[in-house]
Image (tube, rainbow, N blue to C red):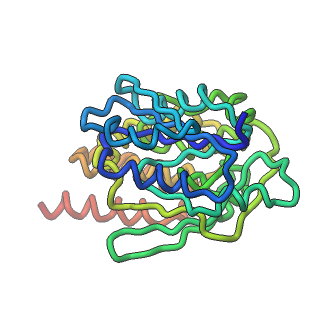
Amino acid sequence: MSKFSIIIPTYNRASLVTRAVKSVLKQYFNDWELIIIDDGSDDGTKETLEEYLKDERVTYKYQNRSGVSAARNKGLELASGEYIIFLDSDDELLENLLHSLISIPHTKYDLVFWNTKKISGELIHIWKPTKLDIIYRNIVGSFLSGSVCYKKSLLEEVKGFDEKLEFGENYELGMRLTHHQELKTYILPEIHLIYHVNSKSRARNDPGAKLKSLIYLLNKHITIYQTDKYSYSRLLYQIGYLNERLGRKKEALQKFEEASKVAPRYLKPLIKKFLLKFKRFSS
């Protein structure tokens, strides 16, 4: 049994996935296993990875296209580690991450978070764990993929990722975890993840699929969202914004109005509502 299981879901990333794999192989601490779940790739991903599969710590599993959440759950099912890290197939862990994790004075934590270097072209942004909203019980953290280490038993208790979600699945998992029990968390103050923004899947920028996921999220967790008017209003605003992008102005206006009523001091939906009405009047 390994101390850490790193799970990389991948789909048609033959040109990028080796970057993620190499970042695991370079870890100073060696008690780990790497599980690569190929979610239906047809671009030669397996052939690209063959030289890395010679390492007995690396496991490759192919499955029919099922989505990133299903791929992560399959990795969780196969994992033997006490702790789990999910890494996107285009990102990189810095080589001292696992060593830093085992160096924590008290190791019995449910979640450990760390800083992320986000790269978008020539732009670099340092993303740090922050105090999250009431819907996450105000914990300090970040559920960005690759920036958190989970206790495996905790993930199993909440049954992993919701496979119906195409977007927001990491933060939906975080919401369920924080409402499942009182969590013991720890923050590593250093950067341990390089997150490549520009190489993210175009499919994950599909407004129609995003809208479907956000509506599902709202319906699933409406009781939780109603405990935090600002989070609730922001979600309604996002649903309105996506409707506007899809040309559904009536639905967009309705959601902007709902968002304004929920949190009158949150001005974004109010401004959007005004602009949308002005466009309709002037056209």
Residue 206, can we see it? no
Q: Is residue 189 left or right of residue 221?
A: right
Please identify the quarter of the rendering in which residue 115 is found.
Answer: bottom right
Q: Position of residue 98 (x, y in %)?
A: 68, 55
Choose between 195 and 276: the one closer to the eye. 195
> Is 26 placed above or below 214 here?
below
The answer to whether residue 120 of the structure is visible from this angle is: yes
Task: Write the residue at 87% across / 60% down.
Answer: 105
Q: Quadrant of the C terminus?
A: bottom left
Residue most toward the left? 283
Most extreme residue toward the top, as rendered? 64
Marker count (numbered): 0
> Which residue is located at x 49 percent, y 58 percent?
92
Left or right: 180 as drawn, with respect to 213 = right
Q: Position of residue 18 (x, y in %)?
A: 40, 50
Relative image position of residue 194 (x, y in whole percent) = 49, 64
1 left or right of 255 in image = right
> Quick check: 220 above or below 133?
above
* Residue under the image location 55 percent in, 62 percent down: 193
Q: Within the image, what quadrant is residue 26 found in?
A: bottom right
- Residue in the picture at 41% in, 69% down: 119
Q: Position of residue 268 (x, y in %)?
A: 43, 64
Placement of the N terminus among the 4 image quadrants: top right
The residue nearer to you, when weighing 54 against 217, is 54
